[in-house]
Amino acid sequence: MDCYARSHSQDTLLTRFQSAGLGLETANNLARKGGKVYFTARSKEKAERAKEYVRSKSPDMAEDQLVWISLDLGDVVSILRAVDEIKASTQRIDVLSKGLWVL
């Protein structure tokens, strides 16, 4: 199934990106489809710039539609904290995007 071909207005989406490039465009495209997008990045400053970029492309997006989760994949404590934060925030993840592939 092509995750970009349908509306995601009721979906919860999780994407991992560094705050630039393909990951940023993935978050941008998924957010424009209407779902709630959780995105991960290590740096708060870069995450804020990424949020500004996505919001500039989708000015009608709700404030809570794009959610940053701090995540450093090289730090087990950071991974566990991110998992706990996601589990506390949502009951399900409908689309998982990691780099070049989507599940």
Image (tube, helix red, strand yellow):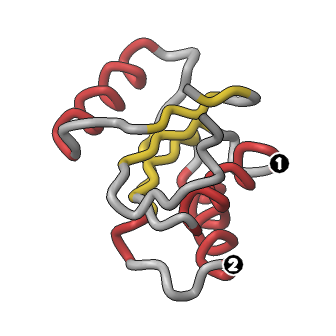
Q: Of the residues shown, which amino acid type is indicated by label 1?
A: Gly
Q: Is residue 37 left or right of residue 100?
A: left
Q: Earlier in the sequence, mark 1 or mark 2?
A: 1
The span from disc 1 to disc 2 (Cα, nearest Å) is 15 Å
Q: Residue at x 58, y 68 (%)?
A: 32
Task: Where is residue 16? Give x, y as percent.
Answer: 59, 36
Q: Is residue 11 above or below residue 61?
A: above
Q: Is residue 28 left or right of residue 67?
A: right
- Quarter occupied by residue 85: top left
Determine which of the numbered discs, if any, sits on residue 57 in the image: 2
Task: Where is residue 43? Give x, y as percent.
Answer: 59, 46
Q: Quadrant of the N terminus?
A: top right
Between 52 and 96, the residue placed more toward the observer is 96
Q: Residue at x 59, y 77 (%)?
A: 55
Task: Where is residue 86? Give x, y as percent.
Answer: 29, 37
Q: Residue at x 71, y 44 (%)?
A: 23
- Report which residue position mark 1 lands on: 21
Q: Of the residues shown, which amino acid type is indicated by label 2?
A: Lys
Which residue lies most toward the right here? 21
Determine which of the numbered discs, if any, sits on residue 73 in the image: none
Task: Where is residue 96? Give x, y as percent.
Answer: 50, 32
